[in-house]
Amino acid sequence: MTASALTRPGQRERLSEKIGEIDWKLAGLLAFVAGVGGLMLYSIAGQSWDPWAANHMTRFAIFFIMMLGLALIDLRVWFAAAYPIYFLALLLLLAVEAVGEVRMGARRWLDLGFTSLQPSEIMKIGVVLALARWYHGATAQEARFHWKLIVPAAMVGVPVLLVAHQPDLGTAILVAITGGSIMFMAGLSWKIIIALGAAGLAALPPFITFVLHDYQRQRIMTFLNPEADPSGSGYHIIQAKTAIGSGGLLGKGYGLGSQSQLDFLPEKQTDFILATVGEEFGFVGTFAVLLVMGLVVASTLRIASLSHSHFGRLGAAGVIATFASYVVINGAMVMGLAPVVGVPQPLLSYGGTVMLSLMIGFGLVMGVRVHRYQELPSGRGQLM
């Protein structure tokens, strides 16, 4: 966008101008990650597009087009829809508590007849939008240290508790990290951060003892000593580390990973797909994939910094906080540096629901880029 175009805001509303303002480099990086995911899913299925690779790439193509469509939506529409989307997601989470469908011992889904819906995925976007709108209308003092911070804290805390109760500890952690990241980037006082950190550490032992389910406590014990039960609870971590370690510097070669090809590696298409990358392409290939994901983070933060509205800045930053949390938690989990909590690698792992919520988020990011000069109302119609 040239400087002269700034004096002609009507020109920026043209469809051709908006399409030109889409960050195609970021779009290419996202396509690269999803493409690597498709190649790995093809490989671990025995060089077959079924049952994962074809579905993965088809979903991404559809969601990619959707992302581009969302990028063209005026930022004022996102702003107006922020609270309704959040409260809709909250109502759906409450509906899960009442009439949710139970699968594998967890109540996380709503059966809509023609499909199943996981409201926690909607909440990931809802929290980002609602917090971005609240802080858009907050003063610097209110964002730093003020009793009104009870409102954004509740916006994060209530869905975290509801999701954790399903139980879905991985998603609850992601929502908490995303919300906390937005509050931090909005200017939260270090006094509050230190106090919350100390309180969290003090509450950790009783939380593990009295709140977590037995299988969740077992995951923590397994993380601390996976070799104690190598053929049982420690199997996942041991096989993942074996796959990564056997890849060495350059890997065994595409389609030649014994751990994944011979089904030693569990959940190889979802939670542990990064281990298959390490086995077949080694340290260099894994580093390259993670580097591209780092470029996605850097590109999104740059988009956030260019936005003229606080809503746009925090909205884009919140989306990338979720994305980065996926990358870090899954990477640590696969390498045995964190307990297994069922968090996939974004766009790389097989799974439509997570991909959908992420691509909606990146639609918002692209929208912030396209409408970065958009001025928004003060937001004083906020809660409290």
Image (cartoon, helix red, strand yellow):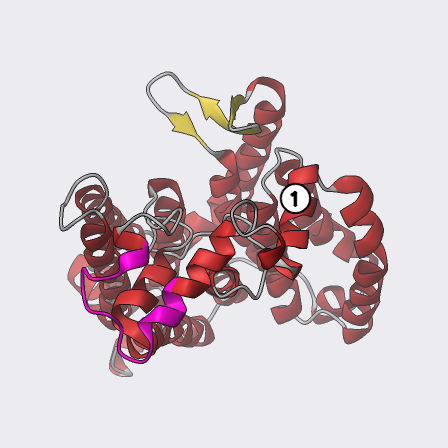
Q: Residue at x 53, y 33 (%)?
A: 88
Q: From the viewer's perspective, is residue 295 above or below residue 333?
A: below
Q: Residue at x 57, y 26 (%)?
A: 96
Q: Nearer the viewer, residue 236 or 120?
A: 236
Q: Secondary structure at mark 1?
A: helix
**180 to the left or right of 108:** right
* Residue 372 shows in this picture: no
**Labels in figure, total:** 1
Range drawn in magenta: 243-259
Q: From the viewer's perspective, is residue 349 above or below residue 101?
A: below
**350 to the left or right of 340:** left
Q: Residue at x 61, y 64 (%)?
A: 181
Q: Nearer the viewer, residue 331 or 43?
A: 43
Give the image location of residue 313, x and y in percent.
Answer: 49, 67
* Amino acid type shown at disc 1: Gln
**63 to the left or right of 254:** right
Q: Residue furthest bottom?
A: 3
In the rendered image, which quarter is residue 228 located in? bottom right
Is 245 magenta? The answer is: yes
* Residue 376 shows in this picture: yes
Give the image location of residue 352, x and y in percent.
Answer: 33, 42
Q: Residue at x 58, y 58 (%)?
A: 227
Give the image location of residue 224, x and y in percent.
Answer: 66, 60
Q: From the viewer's perspective, is residue 86 above or below residue 220?
A: above
Q: From the viewer's perspective, is residue 119 above or below residue 81?
A: above
Q: Which residue is mark 1?
A: 216
Q: Nearer the viewer, residue 334 or 22?
A: 334
Crowding at label 1, few (<14), some or many (≥20) Cα neighbours within 10 Å?
Answer: some
Give the image location of residue 363, x and y in percent.
Answer: 34, 55
Is 147 magenta? The answer is: no
In the rendered image, which quarter is residue 180 located in? bottom right
Q: Quadrant of the N terminus?
A: bottom left
